[in-house]
Structures are given as structure tokens and as C-alpha cells.
Amino acid sequence: MLAFVVALLVYMYIATAGQLTRDAATAADQEYAALERAYAEGGIRRLNQEVVERASRQGPFLYMLADANGELITGDFRRLPVTPGEAEQRVDFQFEREVGENEVDRGRALGRVGRLLGGPILLVARDLGDNAAIVQRITRVLYTVAILGLVLSVASGLLASGQAARRAEALSNTAHDVMAGDLSRRAPVRGAGDEFDALAEDMNAMLDRIERLVHTTRTAGDAIAHDLRSPLTRFQQRLESALDAPPDSEADRNALRKAVEEADKILAMFQAVLKVSRVETAANWRFEEVDVTALARELAEFYEPAAEEVGLSFKADIADGLTVMGEDGLVTQALSNLIENAFKYTPEGGRVEVRARAGGEHFIRVSVMDDGPGVPFEERERVTERFVRLESARSSQGVGLGLALVSAVARLHKGQLELNDGLGSGDRPGLDATLVLPRTAPQR
Amino acid sequence: MRVLLVEDDNDMAQALRGSLEGDDHSVEWARDGEEGETKALGGAYDVIVLDRMLPKKHGTHVVRALRDRGVSTPVLILSALHDEDHRIEGLDAGANDYLGKPFSTRELLARVRALWHGRDPVAPQTKLAVGDLDMDLLGRTVHRAGKKIDLQPREFRLLEYLMRHAGQTVTRKMLLENVWDYHFDPQTNVIDVHISRLRSKIDKEYPGTLLHTVRGSGYRLEA
């Protein structure tokens, strides 16, 4: 801070002094030019007159007129300070002249000297004396400003560091409270827009995520326990029936067969949970170019008979040349989850459409749209969490991981899942579930 | 069929052994990678079922070693890590099939049989036949009892796979992986719908069912 102020002052000094000097030189040049014109119009006599007249004005200019040999004709000085060459030149010299009795005017002058046509030498210079006074005054002002600035910056520094200590303490307190178990605490953001606020905001974002993860884990534990309870109970009941029934009887085989079905369902549930976890952990996935156009077309063809089977009209509209960097299997799984959801929740006679196109220059949008009941606006955030199933879906099968996986896959691919109204209308707007993924140019 | 089972988890091994023996196979058991490799080199087995995570020598390294020594016995890898990378790694090492845990035993049994049946490919076939169903692989046509059947490309591929595994139980997962190259788990009965479409084309109007449903497992094409 201090260094900056000093540098600023030095710059200002140099700039001011420099400007004044330049102005002086320019003024002297103009004066010289005026006298040159006078000489051109009226010869040496006229020039002599002018010089005498102007010198007598006691202005800021100093004059000298000499003959071709340098002998004084008239002027403020007895001798030329400099012998001019052929061309005009800048002259910068210290002078001394008598101004009245026993008074000597000393100083620095800056101007021009040259040989006029026909021989006489003309010198015009501006006395920089008053400039020096101006610069001195400015310098004094600058020193005052500098000292004031120094005092202020020290004071504000002390103030800031006191504040800084307090801000750091606030953040530290928040961290301690969280560690003690209160996950809902957040760091205060003062609105000053400084590094402390930035740090507090980052910390809060981190805490949000942690709270969400902990919540998900707790919910997941509850949800798994809840959702597993029924199949596991049925599993046990079937096995008990098998034990009770006479061995190798029809009842026995039936019970065992049903037990195996329940076991399959439980295993499928675990598979799904593991998959979502693996995608969310985001390690070890090797990305390569995925031809989304081909993938979507094949998947639509794969699902088309299933749509017909449940009485849905199914359409696919896939643009050419859509590619992303990603994992083929995951994108396939995500899209298939969306399609299967659409089939599950759209009643007979409805419509399901798969659309894939570019979304601006940098993204592709793969959408599955239906005209089923849709997802209410306020539930759209929640429904992509694990194990969340809407009340309206209570009666159908499933564990609530479909959209969680799609969302996780989208995030892994640096994209996102968007949920909007679909193909329906009114109070059954349907759902438009769109995977937005950053695209790459096809490398072919 | 003689099966070599290489599995370090005792409980898992006992359960698998039980299932394999129940399916009429004789089972030899190795507890770690080195023992597995030694036994595989020394004995003559029809199929090797190998866990990926093994003590002493890693499953994929065992497979690679066997292939380097010219052992061409079909290998099925079982693994708790079955994402795409590890699957490809296993197949690159020389394994023939890859099944992720948790798996259903019936899935395993179906795949073990499929490996055995597919082990000695005869000279490249141009025709497949099951009962009075004929498939011309070059002309991409199918006839039953002499009458031509119109199939979509995907239906043709599905039927081809079933015919190549005629007489064996083929699971939905096997169909999903081999006919469509999909490794996700569909929650709906999509495969069943494809099968029923195929059935309506090749079975419905003909005497004698060829395409059977195997309850709890999958399907089988058999005269």
C-alpha cells in the first residue's frame, strides 16, 4: 500500500515537472517562430526592434540577438551560452543576469537558438524559475498527501486485521459447531464481497453437500431397510412354506420358486444401489467417444416392441452426428431408465417420444417425453434423490433409484438432468426428462 | 462336464459346487490363484469358473498365464467388480464370459453350459437348423417347413443366437449382452416382448413348438 503511494507520488512529480518543462519549450519555440517571421518581413532592423521591445516587457522570456560572429547586438545576456551550429537547436542553460542594482537573477532557461537567413543568431528561452516554484508547491502538497495516506493506510490496516481476525474466528466457530454435530450451521456471509465472504460461501456450499450426503445416507439406510423388509419377509415366508409342505410336492416347488423370485428382486435392488453409488463416486470410469446418435436409435428400436405391448405410441426423432465424451454403458443405462419410467407411468393409449438433438453449440439434449401424470414442479428436485418415490407411484414396483442413477450419470458426464412438462396438457402435463450433456465434435 | 472352480470364499464355493453338481457336473475346487493355475495346467477340464479376486495370484493373471501356455479351456470370470473396464480387461486377458456378483445361480449354470457347447466351433457355418427351422447365414433368410419367414434384422440376430445355442437354456441377460451388446439391467420385460414377437413369427402357425420358455431361467430353442 505504502509502496504504491510512493510510486504514485514519484510518477506525479515526474509527470508534472516534465509537463511544465515541455510547455516551456513549446512556448519558447513559438516565440522564436514569431521573431523569425518578423525578420522575414522586416529584416534585421525589424527584428532588432522586436527583440528590444519584448525584452523590455520583463516577461518570462529571455532573448538574445547576435551577429554572425556571435557579437551581441541586443538582448538579456552578454554572450551566447552556446554557439549554434548550422541548424536550429534546443538550448538548455543556467543563466545569470543583472536586473537592477546589485540584483542578480539566476536560473535555468530552456529554449531555442539558431542562425537566421543572412547570418544573425537568435536565441529565445523561457525562464523556468517560476516553473520550479510551481513544482515545489506541488511537491509539498504531494508530501502532505503521502503522509496522510501513510497514516490512513496504517490505521485501516490495523482495523482490517482486527476485522480479519474476527472473520476468521467466525468461520472457525462454524466449523467447530458442525464438528460437534450440528450440520445445519452455516458460516455468516457479510456481503463485503471479499475473500472472507468467498471462503464462507465455499464453506457453506461444502456443508450443504455434506448435509445432503449424510441425509441421503441416513435416508438410504432407512429406505433400504424399509424397502427390503417386505421382500425379505416374503422370502422367509416362502421358505417356511416350503419347509412345511411335503418335500418335492407341488406346494413345495411353488413356495421355493416364489422364494427365488423374491431373492432375485432383493438382489436387483442391491445391484441398483451399488450402481448408483459407483457412478456417484466417479472414480475409475474411462471415457471415450460415445456415438449418441447410434446409441439412441438402437435403444429406441430395442424398446419399440415393448411400447406397443403396453399400448403406447412410441416415436423416435434422433439427429445425426451427436457425440459425447463418456461411458457408453452408463449413457445407455440412463436413457433406458428414462424410457422405462415413461413406459411405467404413462397409461395405455398414451404417447412416448425419444428425441435427441444438439442444444446450442456445446451440448446435446436427449429427451424422453410422455403424456402421463408428470412430476409436480415442487417435487422435481426431490425426485432425483435416491429412494424417493412419489405418492402417486406407491402402488407400482421399483425402489426409486431410476432417476437417481440418471442424475448421477448426467453429473458424471459434466451435464445435468432436466425435468419439465411433457407432451400432455392441463393437470396431466406429462414429463419431459432431458439429459443435457456436453458434446464433442465427432472424430472421424 | 468337468468344471474347475477357483474361489477363495468358502461359503460361496460350497454353494457353487452344490449347484454345479446338481446340474450334473463334476467339480474340482481350488482355493487360490496359484492352485487354480496349477490344476488347470495339469487337468483336463471342460470349463473353468474363476473368481477375479483371488489370493496369491489375481484371476485375470491366471487366465492370461493359461492362454499363454496354450490352454484353451473356456473360462468364466466371476467378479464383484463388473463395470465395463474390468469386464473388458477380463475378456482381453482371454476369458470367454464374465458374470458380476450378485448373480443368480441359474444364470451361472446357463452360461457354463453355453461355454461348453460353444467350445469347439466347427468349420464356419453357413447354415443353422433346429427341427424344421432353417437359417441361411449368408443369404440372411429363414424358412420353416420350407416356407419363408420375414424377419427384421434384430429378430434375425435374436433367432441366430438361439439357434447357435439350440438345446441350451439361454437367460435374458445372455440375450441382452450377446444380441444387443447391452450391459444394463432392464427393469421391464423388454426381452420377453422381443421373444414373443419372434415366437409369433416362427412358432404360432406351425405344428410343434420350438421356442420354449424355461420358467425362472430364460428360453430354449429346441425341437
Image (cartoon, rainbow, N blue to C red):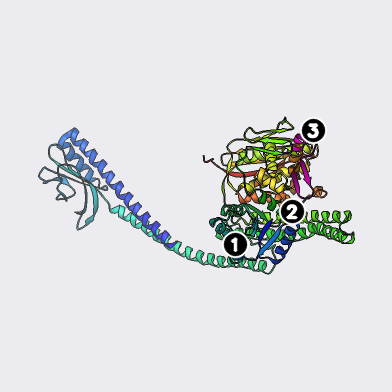
Question: Which of the marked residues, 1 or 2, is nearer the chain's N terminus?
Answer: 1
Please say if A430 is above or below A219.
above
> Could you tell me how far apart the alpha carbons at marks 1 and 2 are, in whole angstroms?
29 Å
Question: Which of the marked residues, 3 or 1, is nearer the chain's N terminus?
Answer: 1
* Residue A435 seen from this side: yes
Of residues A378 and A19, which is closer to you in this image?
A378
Numbered disc 2: what chain? B
Name the residue rendered at 81%, 59% in the picture.
A232
Of residues A110 and A408, which is closer to you in this image?
A408
Residue B140 left/right relative to A120: right
Residue B31 left/right relative to A233: left
Residue B106: assigned label: 2
Numbered disc 3: what chain? B
Name the residue rendered at 12%, 39% in the picture.
A119
Q: Return the x and y of residue A115 as percentages of the image width and height.
A: 15, 41
Residue type of the residue flagged with mark 3: Glu
- Position of the N terminus of chain A by quadrant: bottom left
Q: Return the x and y of residue A114 as percentages of the image width and height.
A: 18, 43
To which quarter of the image does residue A348 belong? Answer: top right
Q: Return the x and y of residue B79 as percentages of the image width and height.
A: 65, 58
Q: Return the x and y of residue A442 as percentages of the image width and height.
A: 54, 40
- Circle 3 residue: B205
- Please tell me whether mark 3 sits on a helix, a strand or a loop: loop
* Magenta part of the chain: B198-220
Name the residue rendered at 11%, 46% in the picture.
A70
**Which is more foreground, mark 3 or mark 1?**
1
**Which is more foreground, mark 2 or mark 3?**
3
Residue B42: assigned label: 1
To which quarter of the image does residue A308 belong? Answer: top right
Residue type of the residue flagged with mark 1: Gly
- Please tell me whether mark 2 sits on a helix, a strand or a loop: helix
